[in-house]
Every structure is written in C-alpha cells, then in structure tokens.
Image (tube, grey):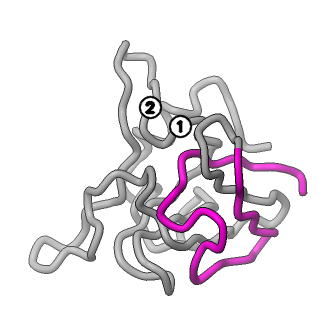
Amino acid sequence: MPQGPDADTLNLGASWDVLCSSPGDSSYKFSIFYNSGPSGAWRNIGYSVYDFDALRPGDGHSHPLRFCSGGASSPPKGSGERIKNNAAAAENSHYKYWSRVYYNSGYKGNQDALAPYQSTGQFRKVYNENASFQWTYN
C-alpha cells in the first residue's frame, strides 16, 4: 500500500505540481475537496494520514494538512483552510487501492470508502467531520 516511513514529510513537502495540480494529473492519487461537487480548493494526498491536523515531518513540530491555495486574483473557496473537519468530497484515482476517509484520527470511526477510480460528490458519513485518511486493499 502507498505508505512509508516518510509519509508525513512527502504529504507536506512534495512539489506544488504533485500536491496542488489538477486532481487526476498528480502522481498522488487521492484528492480531497473543500466543497461538494467536488469543487472549491483541493489537496492531492499520496500517503495515509493518521491525523489531518498533526503531520510530523521530522522537524520536531506538528503540522496541519491544508487545502492548496490557488489563484491569486480569485482563490477557490477553502484555499489554505485546514483539511481536518473541512472536507466535503473526494476522488480516488488509484488503479489498485481503496481510499478511506475516517471520522476520527487514527483510522477510526465512521468512514467513507472509495474503490479504485471512484469519486464522491459528497461524503455520506464524514462530511465536514473527517480526521484521517488511509489506503487499503479493499
């Protein structure tokens, strides 16, 4: 499964074209959106996230994962906002792995699961109440 010892570092510090390029165009295969539809700001995620508000890239600090800021003249709604408890929709562009967004940190509680190449216009169980993300085999 897409996971590794430096997952938090890679989810926070990959290049802009990986993290913030148009969903489906990134090498990171999970995209999470601020608004239903999906619309508004988004973020591409490549590795499981134990807590959207506490990624630890090895610098001794905890960092929140945020939606990308885009468009200087008219940024999309949600630009720069924290992902935790602010996401409404998602797309899974991976050919093999399921993506799961959980209500609680640590991959616990209610979840919305997306099969490979599936998207949801609006989360049913974790709409604006989402704390972690995990890749699984099914």
Instruction: Quadrant for residue 14, please give it.
Output: top left
Label 2 with label 1: CB-CB less than 8 Å = yes
Which amino acid type corresponds to the residue marked 1 in the rendered image?
Asp
Q: Residue at 15% across / 80% down in the picture?
A: 74
Q: Residue at 40% across / 69% down in the picture?
A: 34
Q: Which residue is disc 2 drawn over?
A: 54
Q: List x then y, in percent, for residue 76.
A: 26, 76
Name the side, left or right, on which 117 lies relative to 8. Answer: right
Which span of residues is magenta-colored? 109-138
Instruction: Quadrant for residue 104, please give it.
Output: top right
Q: List x then y, in percent, for residue 138.
A: 90, 57
Name the side, left or right, on which 85 lies relative to 81. Answer: right
Toward the right, the furthest residue is 138
Q: Which residue is disc 1 drawn over?
A: 51
How far, Cα to Cα, is label 2 from label 1? 5 Å
Q: Residue at 39% across / 62% down in the picture?
A: 20
Q: List x then y, in percent, for residue 135.
A: 74, 49
Q: Is residue 70 above or below residue 2?
A: below
Look at the image and say whether residue 12 sits in the magenta stretch: no
